[in-house]
Amino acid sequence: MDVNQNWVEEAWGKITTKLERTSKKIGANFPHLSKNGTYELAPPHWWTAGFWPGQLWLLYRETKDESFRKMAEECEAQLDKVVTDYYRLDHDIGFMWTLTSVARYKLLGDEDARRRALLAANLLMGRFNINGNFIRAWNPWFEGDENTGYAIIDCAMNLSLLFWASQESDDPRYKAVAMKHADTILAHFIESDGSVHHIVHFDPETGERRAFIGGQGYGPHSAWSRGAAWALYGLTLCYDYTEEERYLQTAKKIAHFFIANLPEDSVPHWDFRIPEDVTPYRDSSAGAIAASGLLLLAEKVPASESKMYKKAAIQILKSLYENYGAWDNDDEDGLILSGTSHYPEQKGLDAPLIYGDYFFVEGIAKLKGEKELFW
C-alpha cells in the first residue's frame, strides 16, 4: 500500500521544528506528562525515563543534529545512578535502557552503551519468577504493600531488551526468560476476543493464578486500550525475534480487536469496555503505540494480509497528526494531545504523554521508510 508522503513529510517537519524548540526548554531531563502546557519532569528512576531520550535519538538518526545526541547521552548517563543508588528498579528497565543504551549502541556502536544495556538486561532477567514463569512487575509502593506475584501487560514491550541481549551476547538465557514470560502472556492475559488484562496476580510461591486486576483499565474484565497496544506491539516483537507462530497469531487477534473497536476518528478511548456514564476520554498514546506496532505487524504477515494492518496504522497516525497535534501551539510542550495516563486514579486525563509523543514520532519515522528498530 502506497503512502501519500506529503502529510508524512509535513508531519516530520513539524515534529523536528517543535522538538528543536522544546529540547532547549526540557534539556537532559525526564518529562512525563504535560500540565497546563508544560511537561512535568520526573526523576530518572521513573518508568518513562527512556521516552524523551528515545525521541532525541529518533531525531538525531534523521538530522544528525549534535544537540539531540548530546542531550540523549546526558540522559543515559543519569541512569547509572539509578542502577547503583536506587532500590525500586522494576520491570520497566526495558523501557528505560532500550531507548537510551540500546538505541545509542545501534546508532553509534559505542561499547559503553552496550555494557549498560547488557547490565540492564541482567537486572531485568533477575526479576523472573521461576515458579510462575513471569517477570515480576513492581516493588512495594508503600510499607505493607504486597505485590510479589504481580505481572502486567506493559512488560510485553520490555522483553525486547532480553531478546537483544541474547543476540548480542550469544547467550540463550535471556531469550528463554523472555519466551517464558511471553507464553504466560498468551496463557493468562489475552481473552478469546483479543481483549487484554492489565494486571494478573499469581501466587509467587506456586505460580497459580489468583486474580485479574483492573489496574489502569476500568475493571478486571474491561479492555484497557493501552494494554491492548502494549500486547499487540510486544508480541509482534516476540515474533520478530523468535519466528514462533503463536506470538504472531495472538498479535493478529489483538490487532483485530483493537481495530474493530476504534471510534470514527481512529483514536481509541482509554478503555474499549466502559459504562455509558463513564467519561470516554481518548488515549492518544494507545493509538500511537498500536499504530507503530501495526506497521511492524504489516511487515511480518503475508502480503494478502498486510494492507489491512498498514491501512489502520496510517489512519491512526494521520488522525493523531491532523486532529490531536499541538504543532502551532507554542504554549504546549507536548506533540500529541488527549492522552489518558491513569483514569482510575484520575491522573493525566486529556493530556499529552511523553510515551504517546515517542511512539507517534517512531510511527512517522517508519512511514518515512525507516526500518531499524531500537526495540
Image (spheres, rainbow, N blue to C red):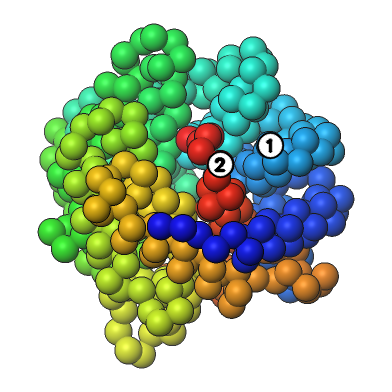
**Residue type at numbered disc 2:** Glu
Frontmost residue, 52 versus 239: 239
Question: x%, y% of residue 307?
Answer: 33, 58
Q: Name the mark on residue 140.
A: none
Residue 219 visible in the shown view: no
Q: Are marks 2 and 1 in contact (CB under 8 Å)?
A: yes
**Residue type at numbered disc 1:** Arg
* Tag count: 2
* Residue labelled with disc 1: 61
- Residue 170, image quadrant: top left
371 on left or right of 269: right
Question: x%, y% of residue 365?
Answer: 59, 48
Q: Which of the two labelled residues, at mark 2 and mark 1, occupies the earlier sequence position?
A: 1
- Name which residue lies at 35% across and 49% down: 298
Frontmost residue, 305 versus 217: 305
Above or below: residue 312 compared with residue 68: below
* Residue labelled with disc 2: 370
Residue located farthest toward the top when viewing the structure as drawn: 170
